[in-house]
Image (cartoon, helix red, strand yellow):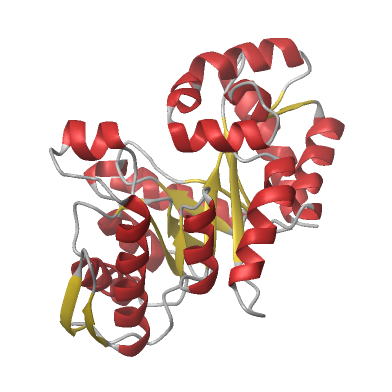
Amino acid sequence: MRIGLSGGGASVTRIIEQAKEAERDGFASLWYPSAMGGDPLVAMALAGRETTAIELGTAVLQTYPCHPLLMANRAAATAFAMGRPGFTLGIGPSHVPVIEGMYGLASDRPGQHTEEYTTILVTALRDGQVDFAGELLSARGRRAVALDAPVPVLLGALAPRMLRVAGAVADGTVTWMANARAVGDHIVPKLRAAASGREPRVVVGLPVVVHDDVAEARAEAAAQFAMYGGLPNYRRVLDIGGAAGPADAVIVGDEESVTRQVRALFDAGATDFWAAPFPVGDRSASRARTRALLASLAAT
């Protein structure tokens, strides 16, 4: 199974060490949030130079603050600096509290914005140049850096229009808070319908912990991930999955139960599982037990 982990660390040295450890332990990928280190791309490029095969992806970089042609050049520069294939660009429009509340930018018409943005970005990365005039965005220019290998683009997509764009324009989706039911009933069918015979990637991100006391684990998850239950996009996909809140979507239980839940994601159509371990009780022991099971599953 293709299993990845959340990427990040308190220093560039730790981020590089983490990537080397994850590659050594057989994990397929690491997924870095947009806020990691202020901007994850420099640290990812350095980690990529110190590893040989592990995929390093963003999950996700926000679209509104960065023009898509500039985003293409940032991605190409990161891939160039890595010096090897394995960089994947995950993007998404983020949320109103971030884009409008934090950055002071307008974020109306997110569906149209994302479709035009992704079209410009994918064209620039694939063809090296773009000439596009849309309703909201336009771009005319060339990519500044040559690419020796493609840079796949994944869209943080949960709503129907976003899934159509992820399947028709991008290379697939990277999700968060979508459980096996939401993946199988909603995400995969819409993504594949838009992909016109291509096989889009479905990177499913969920918090996970191996812990015998399920009630305690879900209570901890409810505290740690409460904010996602209040954001409309995540609330919608939680409802589709029949989850009352984030605590019902996370993967928790003993080794046998977690294995069964992870396999259910792949049975539902996931191509990758992005595991985001969270601690319960003894933090060190919890992390070690969870990582050991995930590493064993990654080897299958």
Please state which of residues 179 and 239 is positioned toward the viewer in this rendering. 239
Q: Is residue 66 above or below residue 251?
A: below
- What's the residue at 63%, 79% (across, down)? 198
Q: Quadrant of the C terminus?
A: bottom right
The picture quadrant where one finds residue 203 is bottom right
Q: x, y percentage for residue 281? A: 62, 12
Q: Is residue 231 above or below residue 67?
A: above
Which residue is at the far left? 104
Q: Is residue 128 above or below residue 292?
A: below
Please state which of residues 139 and 203 is positioned toward the viewer in this rendering. 139
Please state which of residues 20 and 258 is positioned toward the viewer in this rendering. 258
Horizontally, is 36 left or right of 227 in the view?
A: left
Q: x, y percentage for residue 19? A: 47, 53
Q: x, y percentage for residue 78? A: 29, 68
The answer to whether residue 250 of the structure is visible from this angle is no
- What's the residue at 36%, 77% (across, down)? 83
Horizontally, is 194 left or right of 145 in the view?
A: right
The picture quadrant where one finds residue 221 is top right
Q: x, y percentage for residue 9? A: 37, 39
**Picture mark count:** 0
- What's the residue at 31%, 72% (across, down)? 121
Q: Quadrant of the N terminus?
A: bottom right
The answer to whether residue 282 of the structure is visible from this angle is yes
Please state which of residues 207 and 64 is positioned toward the viewer in this rendering. 64
- What's the residue at 37%, 76% (across, down)? 122
Q: Is residue 170 above or below residue 237?
A: below
The picture quadrant where one finds residue 47 is bottom left
